[in-house]
Every structure is written in C-alpha cells, then in structure tokens.
C-alpha cells in the first residue's frame, strides 16, 4: 500500500516527461423533496434511519416509482451542458454488495444515459478550455457508513460500523467527462475550475444546494500519465469522494507526482481506487477498480423506460436561466472590473453577495471593496465562507450609504461592521449604540481645530511658513480628539483657513 512518505517526482519535472489525462465523475444530489423511487423525505441531518421505507430499504415486494421532478432536473442539467437528450432510455440494476446499499443493487443507468455528448467551457489562466461531457445519468444515492474506532475512520482497523439509510435512495445525478487531454501543467487547475463551474451551474439551475462539505456534490478524479510524444494513455487511478475544490486540485497534483515517480523507476501503475487525505494532501490505495462487467448490469424490470416528450424538452431549454459564464461577463461589464478582480470575487465566492449588495443600492465599487476587504478578512480569521458571516447584503449596502452621505468614514464603518457581525443589531443601531456617527457639527469641529492649533503652535507656524505637509499632524490631532469621528477632509480645510494658507 502507498504511504504519504512515498517517493514523488516534483511536479514541474513530471510535466517535462509526461502528459496527464484526466477524467472527472461528479455526483450531484438533487434537491427534491422526496427520494428517487419512493416518497421518503430528503432533509439533511435528520436522526439516523428516520427517513426510510420498504422501497428504499429494498424490502421484499416493494416497488419503485420514478420521481418526475428528478428526471426534469436531470434534463435541465443536460441541456445546460449542451448535451443531447435521449428520446428513449432505461434504468438498470447495478449489482454489488456493500452494507450501505440495502437492496444489494443500485438503480442507475448503464448504456442508455438520459443525457449524452455535451461540453462546458472553463477559464484557466486566461485560457478557455473546452471539456467534453460523455454522459449525464440519473441514479439513487447510497446510505452512509460510519466506521467507529481505529485511526483512519475507514473500515480497516475500525471496532465496528454503523449505517444510516436516510441518504439511500436520494436522487443522484452523475456527470462524466470525456478524457481531458492537452492541459499540461494546468491539469490540476483545470480540474478545479471544472468542478467550480459545475457547482455554479447547479446553483443557477436551482437543482441542488451543492454543499460539498455535506456531500451533496462529490467528485471522483481519474488520472493517468502518457509519455510526452506518446499516443497510448497510461493506466488510470480513481481518487474517490473529493469534497472540496482544493481537494480536487491537490489530488490531481499528487497523483501526477506519485505516478511519475513510479514510471521513472520503471514501475507499473495499478488500476485502483484511492483515498485522499486532506491533512497531508496525499492519496493511498483503496481497492482494485471494478469494470462494468463486474456489476452485472441488466435492465431494471420494475421501472418503465423514459421517453421525454420533445416539446417538453424544448420548453425546458427555453426556460433555462442565465448561465454562470454569461452572467459573469455581464456583471463584469456592468461593474467595470478587471478580469483579475472578477476572478478574485469568484474565488472568494463573493459574486452573489456583491450583486445583492448592488441591488440593495450600493455602488459596485463600494460593494466589492467591503466584501473583498474587511469582510473577507474577518471571514478568513473565523475560518468561514463569506456567505456564512452573520451580515446581509442589505446591511452592507446601508454601511456604504452611511459612508457616502458623510455620516461615517472608513474607520468608523469598519467598527459598524464589527458590531453587526457581533450581533449588536443593524448598522444604524450599532452607530447609535456605539456613538460612531461622524462629527459633522461645523461649530464643534471648528472649536476642536482651534484647540489643536493652539496646542501645536510650532507645527502651525511650519504650515504658515509654507510647509503644507505638516498640516497632516494637525489633522491627526483633530482625529485623535474625536476618536476618529471627524471628517478629515473638512478638518484639513478648516485648519488651512484658520492659518490663512491656501494650497
């Protein structure tokens, strides 16, 4: 078995001698109210084995009935991925034994997928990479096994295992790419970008919450290496159940380095599934990889074939929402931001938040500034995604409005955001509770200016004698006296007027 301490070939060296070939299999749990073949609910986090029935438990005599909403969602996914939609297809039984599959078979699709032969474009380092889609098919998810005891959380070395069948039978769409070649050293980034684009697409379609951390989007990554200038692909490995974009990228990179080291030493790659270890960024051997014949596929006898009506398919096509890539180009033009800034917002998953803040009345530049600056910093410190922060786009828009109207400066605005995040109320409530509103009373500000000038006569003389830069010290004195609540620009203007100096 491979270990995290095995020999690796440095990535750049591997790329000099080998060309990676990728294949990605992405599983998306659909957000339907009920399961694929029965009426059980699909609520995440319910107590174990409380959302089950004779059908999803595979009890004798129970019969499945296909979920029409799941079929519609799968067709919409296929259309968004530029796929052809089958005029006729069937479900099949995929036979295998494992405790998380109570029927000892999974209802899936085999040689007749619902959607096939599509593509999606992704942007990586300013390059557009077209990724072919082999198939999009519909199946049911399995239950969840938890292995208790041992050091790895896997079945080997565990004291015992328990199974929760709540997830068994949830509609699951599998999206399989065609072999991805020609990406070279960009291969890890291309894999990540592809999964990121799929995730945004599923959100836009509204078919899944695609929460990778909860398992509603999981990715298996196939990697093989071909010698530079060669024509025959190498033996592939499949790293299973990656649940973050970062893990996808790291797994591809590690497999390239690991396989290159084996080939450099004259070794042979074993076709197998592998496990990814988040803590080390490495993969270890799982089991030998099954072939299709190992599953003894045959048509599911208890379900009728699917024959989507062409008018219905075309109506679904016409009703597709604006796709993520089109939306990003539109927003970038509307907001006037660079490719780099747009990429940064996308990587931070801030586009939706910035857009909502703009819709709430904030200028695009201000909305982007606060989400990508102060709020991104606080999210990073808390180890959270931006969307998980306890603040709404409407509240951020209100802070932008208070700054634009002169009631807050940036320093005070940061304190307001801090208060909102701490649960102290709305921006206006935080301003009042903390007494953060900027000193705007002209008489009060003028009196403070006179006081600071009197206390710093030597600095004032420098300004009168033409050393304008020294006025900064006097402005600083005013800001200190007001605990940052003065309008610095107006304070500067008043100081110069008092000293009879013009710029």
Image (cartoon, helix red, strand yellow):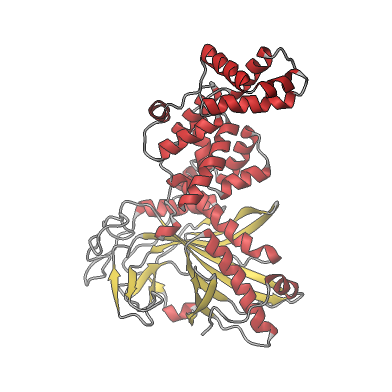
* Up/down of 286 relative to 412, above or below: below
Q: Is residue 317 visible?
A: no
The outermost residue toward the bottom is: 266
Q: Is residue 334 left or right of residue 136?
A: right
> Residue at position x 22%, y 66% from top?
54
* Residue 15 coordinates in the image, percent (x, y): 72, 71
Q: How many marks?
A: 0
The quadrant where residue 500 appears: top right
Seen from the viewer's position, the closer of residues 481 and 361 is 481
Residue 279 appears in the rendering: yes
Q: For residue 83, which quarter of the picture?
A: bottom right
Picture residue at 61% right of the left edge, 47% below the top: 344
**Horizontal side of residue 364 vs 399, given as left or right:** right
The reply, left or right, for residue 278 in relation to residue 98 is right
Question: In the image, is residue 127 above or below residue 496?
Answer: below
- The residue closer to the viewer here, 348 or 327, is 348
Q: Which residue occupies the foreground of this view, 152 or 486? A: 486
Q: Position of residue 27 (x, y in %)?
A: 46, 62
Q: Front-most of 13 and 29?
A: 13
Residue 494, percent from left and from top: 63, 15
Q: In which quadrant of the rendered image does the C terminus lie?
A: top right
The image position of residue 368, as x and y in percent, is 57, 37
Picture layout, residue 496 above or below residue 155: above
From what the image shows, is residue 339 above or below residue 482? below
């Amino acid at each position: 078995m491979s270990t995290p301490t095995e020999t690796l070939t440095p990535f750049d060296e591997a790329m000099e001698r080998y060309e990676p070939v990728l294949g990605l299999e992405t599983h998306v749990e659909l957000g339907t109210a009920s399961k694929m073949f029965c009426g059980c609910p699909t609520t995440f986090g319910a107590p174990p084995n409380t959302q089950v029935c004779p059908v999803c438990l595979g009890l004798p005599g129970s019969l499945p009935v296909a979920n029409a909403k799941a079929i519609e969602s799968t067709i919409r996914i296929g259309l968004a991925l530029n796929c052809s939609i089958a005029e006729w297809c069937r479900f099949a039984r995929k036979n295998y034994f494992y405790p998380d599959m109570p029927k000892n078979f999974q209802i899936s699709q085999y040689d007749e997928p619902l959607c096939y032969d599509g593509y999606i474009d992704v942007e990586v380092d300013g390059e557009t990479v077209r990724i072919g889609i082999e198939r999009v098919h519909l199946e049911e998810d399995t239950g969840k096994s938890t292995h208790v005891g041992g050091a790895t959380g896997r079945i080997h070395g565990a004291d015992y295992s328990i199974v929760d069948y709540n997830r068994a039978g949830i509609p699951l769409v599998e999206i399989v790419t065609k072999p991805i070649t020609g990406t070279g050293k960009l291969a890890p980034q291309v894999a990540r970008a592809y999964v990121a684009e799929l995730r945004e697409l599923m959100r836009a379609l509204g078919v899944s919450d695609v929460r990778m951390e909860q398992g509603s989007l999981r990715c298996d990554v196939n990697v093989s290496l071909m010698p530079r200038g060669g024509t025959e692909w190498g033996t592939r490995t499949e790293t299973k159940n990656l649940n973050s974009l970062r893990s996808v990228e790291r797994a591809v990179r590690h497999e390239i380095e690991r396989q290159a080291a084996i080939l450099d030493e004259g070794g042979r790659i074993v076709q197998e599934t592998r496990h990814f270890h988040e803590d080390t960024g490495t993969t270890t051997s799982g089991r030998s990889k099954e072939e299709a014949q190992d599953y003894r596929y045959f048509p599911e006898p208890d379900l009728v074939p699917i024959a989507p009506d062409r008018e219905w398919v075309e109506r679904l096509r016409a009703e597709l929402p604006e796709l993520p890539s089109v939306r990003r180009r539109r927003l970038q033009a509307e907001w006037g931001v660079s490719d780099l800034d747009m990429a940064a917002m996308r990587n931070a998953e801030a586009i939706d938040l910035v857009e909502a803040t703009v819709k709430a009345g904030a200028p695009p530049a201000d909305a982007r500034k606060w989400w990508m600056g102060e709020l991104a910093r606080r999210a990073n410190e808390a180890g959270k995604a931006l969307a998980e922060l306890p603040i709404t786009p409407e509240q951020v828009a209100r802070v932008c409005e208070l700054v634009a109207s002169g009631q807050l400066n940036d320093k005070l605005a940061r304190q307001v955001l801090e208060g909102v995040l701490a649960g102290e109320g709305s921006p206006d409530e935080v301003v009042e509770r903390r007494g953060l509103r900027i000193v705007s009373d002209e008489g009060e500000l003028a009196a403070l200016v006179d006081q600071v000038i009197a206390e710093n006569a030597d600095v004032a003389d420098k300004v009168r004698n033409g050393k304008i830069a020294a006025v900064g010290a006097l402005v600083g004195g005013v800001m200190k006296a007001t605990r940052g609540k003065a309008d610095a620009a107006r304070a500067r203007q008043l100081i110069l007027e008092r000293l009879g100096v013009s710029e």
